[in-house]
Amino acid sequence: MPTVDTLVEELKLIQNIGTRRIAIIGTRNLSLMHQQLVEILSYALIVSGNTIITSGGALGVNAAVIKGACRADQNKLEIILPQTIGQQPSDVQNVLIGIKGVVEHPDRQNMTLADASRICNREIVELSHQLICFLYHDSHTLKEAIEYAHMQHKIVTVFYLD
């Protein structure tokens, strides 16, 4: 049964169609077809007036989101890194050059990537109105992000790839 707070948030979203902040996160292990679908989704969401929030990544969902968003309007893209640009692979660093909305976290550079990613996913959820997540059933870190989004009364859309 939805709470009053949930209904108020949903009403706000209905009234502000086209101005949502949508988080898209997911697995690094993604088929080419799924990468293309995520890229098209990201592109379409930005073209329709939304802002996309994601994390960095050389492969998978985050890379596809960044590619699609940059094709549409990179000013409507926010990238929250789990750590720093310098800790990203060189091909990711090259992609991130010139994107204004990149947020680094040097305070997390000594953490494991898994721990920094958990914190990063929570931050991304907090900054968004809605979460879209692409994952496998054994993706524990992403499942934690989904649970957190539900606790924060976010709209959550989950695509299991297996």
Image (cartoon, rainbow, N blue to C red):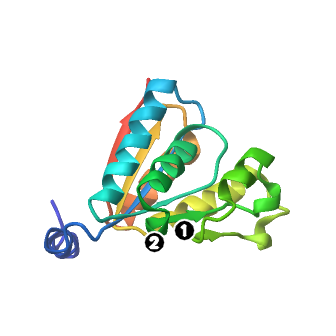
3D distance between C-alphas at marks 1 and 2: 6 Å
Residue type marked 1 = Glu
Residue type marked 2 = Leu
Left or right: 39 as drawn, with respect to 83: left
Residue under the point 46% across and 70% down: 126
Residue under the point 78% across and 73% down: 107
Q: Nearer the viewer, residue 77 or 21?
A: 77
Q: Position of residue 90 (x, y in %)?
A: 80, 48
Secondary structure at badge 1 equals helix
**On the image, which quarter does residue 9 sit in?**
bottom left
Left or right: 112 as drawn, with respect to 58: right
Q: Nearer the viewer, residue 121 or 56?
A: 56
Q: Position of residue 59 (x, y in %)?
A: 63, 38
Residue under the point 24% across and 66% down: 18
Q: Position of residue 114 (x, y in %)?
A: 70, 50
Left or right: 122 as drawn, with respect to 2: right
Q: Position of residue 128 (x, y in %)?
A: 40, 68
Q: Is residue 124 above or below residue 117?
A: below
Secondary structure at badge 2 equals loop
Left or right: 162 as drawn, with respect to 79: left
Quadrant (top left/top right/bottom left/bottom right) for the C terminus: top left
Residue under the point 63% across and 54% down: 56
Which residue in the structure is indicated by mark 1? 123
Q: Residues within 10 Å of mark 2 (few under 14, many from 20)?
A: some
Mark 1 vs 2: CB contact within 8 A: yes
Q: Residues within 10 Å of mark 1 (few under 14, many from 20)?
A: some
Which residue in the structure is indicated by mark 2? 127
